[in-house]
Amino acid sequence: MPLIDRRFLKDLDYLLLGAVLALVGFGLLGISSAAGPAFFNAQLIRVFMGLAICLVVATVDYHRLTQFAPLIYLLAVALLAATLLVGSEVKGSRSWIVLMGFRLQPSELVKVAVILALARYLGDLRENFLSMRQILSLGFLFSLPVLLVVLQGDMGTALMYFPVLGGMMLVAGLRLRFLVAILLISALLAPLGWFMLHDYQRERILVTFNPDLDPQGVGYQTRQSKIAIGSGGWTGKGLGEGSQSQLGFVPEIRTDFIFALLSEEHGFLGAAAVLMLYLFVLFRITGTAELSRDRTGLLIVTGVGSLLFAHVVTNVGMTLGMLPAIGVPLPFVSYGGSALLSMFAAIGLVISVRHRRFVY
């Protein structure tokens, strides 16, 4: 029996996959413009790898994946621990590891494992609302990988796990009084979290509220990003013609701040097209959640949608100077391998749920 049969190909969500590939196309344009053919070719290889991973994951019944979720979760935690011990340090974060000749960031890949683990736990529950004991169990399950990511020094990636937990808990049945209690506890612990941050992390937050606080230091990147976005006008300066991006005024232009490059070179219309593609992807994900025939599938799709939404809002907020620059990539668009492969795997889960909407 072939890995991908005719029924799968006929039922494949081509609209979702097409929108994702359109986002990838925007990213490749930006990478080619800002970094040249070598980076373009490297990213193109990752795209093909990601697409293959997406299709392989999509062909596997998500029920089978959740059966192995505990093992996948333990392997993910072990990989994070190994990265903390023997990983490479890049820009103050020990979050990279070389595995089978490839340089990977496990904290990005583990997001999918966490979604599967939470879906397995919540999907097995039969109550309409979560009890305090179940919330505490979820907290333990969730906090272990997040704590390891924090210890690696990658606060930005760690923060992206929280919307996944929040979205899946709300769908699973979080009582209002528990939600209020969680928000109050979070607010009370916020001052403690402030003192746990490194000096440069606190500076990034302060600069968000006062860009003139350090215009040549921490605030430089955000300031230049906003200049690039504003200079694009309606239609942009043209591919390879953006002065801010081409002359190196915006650091990390091909990774975390690629939205600024696209806005400068393709203008408001190009930036709006990118955001509309994300909106369409989220619309298809929401549609799949509505079609899901069981609790587990609904939870998986909710986790993926929450993760994608959080990444887009945070990244765009960074480039606009509305949120601190915490190193969160723009899904399917930013240069890099681990985040891209992780997101493709997540989309594969969504396709798997949609394909099996008529199967119990």
Image (spheres, rainbow, N blue to C red):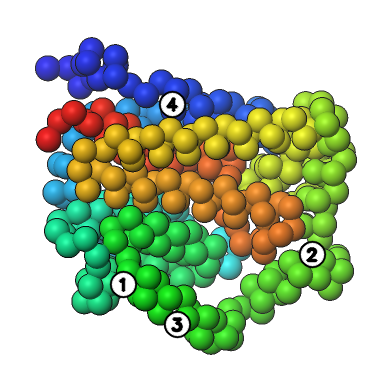
Between 43 and 3, the one lying in front of the other is 3
Between 49 and 193, the one lying in front of the other is 193
Disc ID at residue 17? 4
Disc ID at residue 139? 1
Whole-angstrom CA distance, mark 1 to mark 2, is: 35 Å
The quadrant in which the C terminus is found is top left
Q: Quadrant of residue 61?
A: top left
| Tag 3 and tag 2, C-beta contact below 8 Å | no
Q: Measuring from the top left, give residue 189's x and y in whole percent.
A: 50, 84
Quick one: label 4, few (<14), some, or many (20+) residues within 10 Å? some
Q: Which residue is mark 3?
A: 185
Tell me which numbered mark, 1 or 2, is placed earlier along the sequence. 1
Q: Measuring from the top left, give residue 134's x and y in whole percent.
A: 22, 71
Callout 2, which amino acid? Answer: Gly
| Tag 1 and tag 4, C-beta contact below 8 Å | no
Q: Residue at x 56, y 26 (%)?
A: 22
Quick one: label 1, few (<14), some, or many (20+) residues within 10 Å? few
| Tag 1 and tag 3, C-beta contact below 8 Å | no
Quick one: label 3, few (<14), some, or many (20+) residues within 10 Å? few
Mark yes or no: residue 170 visible: yes
Q: Secondary structure at mark 4?
A: helix
Image position of 100 with respect to 1: above or below: below
Callout 1, which amino acid? Answer: Gly
Quick one: label 2, few (<14), some, or many (20+) residues within 10 Å? many
Name the mark nearer the viewer: 4 or 3: 3
Tell me which numbered mark, 4 or 3, is placed earlier along the sequence. 4
